[in-house]
Amino acid sequence: MADVLVLSRHGAGGVRQVAEILTQLGHRAVLLSELPDDANREVCAAHLTIDWDKADPDQVAAAAEAAQVRPAAVVNMVESLIGWQVGISHRFGLPGGADGRAILADKALVRAELRRMGLSDVAFVAGRAADVDIEAVRSYPVILKPSRESGSSRLVARADGPDQLRDRLRELVAGGSGDLGVIVEDYLDGTEFSVDGPVVGGRFVGLFAVEKPDHDERRHHDAGLLIAPPQSEPVQRGRERLVAMVSALCTEAPLAGLWLHVEGRALADGRTELLEINARPGGGVHRAAILHSCGVDPFWEAIQMALDEHYTTDCAGLAQGSQLFGMRPFEIYEVGRVAEATTLEEWQKIDGVLLGYAQAGFEVTSLEKENFFGEVLLTASSVQELRRVANRVEQVFHHRLLPPDAN
């Protein structure tokens, strides 16, 4: 039995799923988070608290020693904690600290490396929010987003001109985020899609692709129906190009022992550009969709790679099936706590709904990020029928919020 650190921030990180798998494997899940009353601690064998903004790996080591925890591996599903994962792994001499994954902790580093390798034409400017050189931005529109403190599309915004960009940066500074590292890059007009898969032998194996035809271009959040496998020819071609691009980066960095969730765009002019690389499986119902379509559990594979640096996902015979799947997330756009809403049982009465989740008591504290109350996984024989099922799911959705100051 080994102690495995499971990193979490703001309650994110797939802690319950990770803890369940670790328990099945005979290991102890040790939660490492900033919340003393973390709701996920009940499913873990131990809980260590850490101030992610002020502490360092030596303090993690001291807390582990005091709790008689001897870390044998680190599992992390949170983008903003990649740097921490690398630092903790280095501190304890564990898998995950010796490869090139530190580059994934900073979107500006990834963008710079892709340009150096001749794999991307996206122009960008990066720095502290308080110091970004707006004059260096040569064309608009642009996307502004955190370069390190990312996840759930937090603080992502579009600017159509220098005045909008200046105003948005001022808002960040006024809100106390002047030291936040940000990247300002070209807005890419096209169809967004994602690809999931492991890194095997220095190569990204893109197993599971999802097309996002209904993507919310105002908020830059997932929305509407997500379709797998991709049905449009531009995204089908873009998938191959994106996989090749990420594979080249994996070889150059180098990257190993990872499951990646990569987002890209198929552009109108035929190009494909990478948006970001996440060093973890896709969220929401992606895990179930990948298991149904490809016959492999991405969480299981990611955890096995974290436990053993020599573990390699066996991709022989693995491929995305032709069966159509749809994912329909539901976001709440008001601050408050959900007092009453659609239940998963209501959704599952609809033909074509396989599974999903709905979070009772879900609370929205900020509109500066994605706030998904629930999501369902659908299947049908055609895209037209898939949309019919999604429409029935949408008609069932309802919710009532209590305002933030309500008891």
Image (spheres, grey):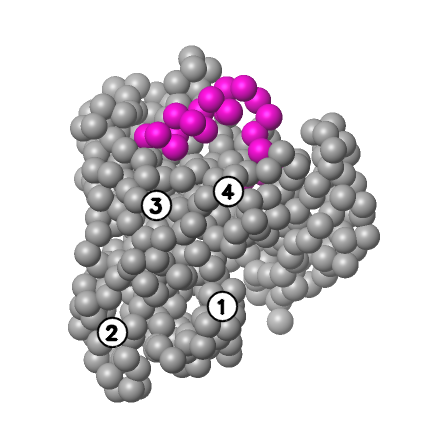
For the record, the magenta segment spans: 222-245
Give the residue type at disc 4: Gly
Q: What's the distance in space between the residues labelled 4 and 3, CA to CA?
A: 14 Å
At mark 1, the secondary structure is helix
Image quarter (top left, top right, bottom left or bottom right) of the N terminus: bottom left
Question: Of the residues under marks 2 and 3, which one precedes in the sequence?
Answer: 2
User: Is any part of residue 223 visible from this angle?
Assistant: yes
Q: Which residue is mark 1?
A: 21
Crowd tier of the residue under label 2, counting other residues whose Cα lies within 10 Å: few below 14, some 14–19, many 20 or above: some
Name the side, left or right, on which 345 lies relative to 210.
right
Q: What's the distance in space between the residues labelled 2 and 1, CA to CA?
A: 23 Å
Question: Of the residues under marks 4 and 3, which one precedes in the sequence?
Answer: 3
Q: Which residue is mark 3?
A: 200
Question: Of the residues under marks 3 and 1, which one precedes in the sequence?
Answer: 1
- Residue depicted at x 43% and y 50%: 314
At mark 3, the secondary structure is strand
Q: Which of the two residues, 9 or 383, is positioned nearer the viewer here?
A: 383
Which mark is in front, 4 or 2? 4
Q: Which residue is mark 4?
A: 317
Image quarter (top left, top right, bottom left or bottom right) of the C terminus: bottom right
| The magenta stretch spans residue 227 | yes
Q: What's the distance in space between the residues labelled 3 and 1, CA to CA?
A: 22 Å
User: Is any part of residue 32 visible from this angle?
Assistant: no
- Residue depicted at x 50% and y 43%: 318
Q: Which of the two residues, 163 or 124, is positioned nearer the viewer here?
A: 124
Crowd tier of the residue under label 4, counting other residues whose Cα lies within 10 Å: few below 14, some 14–19, many 20 or above: few
Give the residue type at disc 1: Ile
